[in-house]
Image (tube, rainbow, N blue to C red):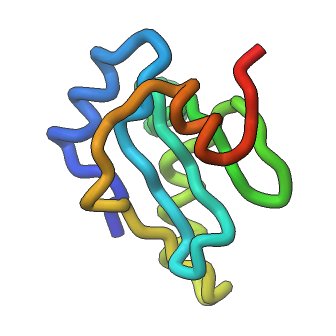
């Protein structure tokens, strides 16, 4: 299962700055990944996503696209979907909507 198609990944590879371009979320909306940028690492044949992660707590960090796809396709019952209606917005606006502040 693909959470991000090739076109989305190519756009993320060119992104820099502090705008959130894509949101991935669990079906129950308890976890969300607000994707800021991506980089391809050939040695792992995977994409490292830099994002704001909102789950048990909120943090800026990285996650591997392959791990999210594996979780979503596993039998854990934790389906992850891309929010197709997401409109890119500044990171500080996203953090504010979550009740967080940018340092």
Q: Is residue 34 above or below residue 40?
A: below
Res. 84 in view:
yes
Q: Is residue 23 left or right of residue 32?
A: left
91 with respect to 62 (left or right): left
Please identify the quadrant where the C terminus is shown. top right
Locate residue 57, reporting x and y percent: 84, 50
For residue 57, above or below residue 61: below
32 displayed left or right of 66: right
Q: Residue at x 46, y 56 (%)?
A: 24
Above-or-below relation of 88 to 92: below
Work out whether 66 lies above or below 22.
Answer: below
Q: Is 101 or 64 nearer to us in this picture?
A: 101
Q: Is residue 17 left or right of residue 82?
A: right
Image coordinates of residue 14 in percent, x first then y, are 28, 15
Find residue 61 and report its image quarter.
top right
Q: Quadrant of residue 71?
A: bottom right
Q: Residue at x 43, y 50 (%)?
A: 23
The quadrant of the image that shows the N terminus is bottom left
- In this view, the residue in front, 100 or 19, is 100
Q: Looking at the image, can residue 37 be seen?
A: no
In the orientation shown, which residue stands out farthest toward the left?
7
């Amino acid at each position: 299962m693909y959470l991000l198609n090739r076109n989305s990944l190519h756009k993320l590879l060119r992104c820099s700055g502090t705008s959130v371009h894509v949101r991935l979320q669990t079906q129950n909306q308890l976890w969300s990944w607000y994707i800021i940028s991506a980089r391809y690492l050939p040695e792992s044949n995977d994409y490292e996503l830099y994002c704001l992660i909102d789950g048990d707590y909120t943090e800026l960090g990285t996650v591997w696209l392959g791990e999210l796809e594996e979780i979503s396709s596993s039998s854990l019952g934790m389906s992850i979907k891309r929010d197709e209606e997401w409109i890119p917005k500044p990171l500080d606006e996203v953090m504010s909507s979550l009740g967080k502040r940018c340092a």
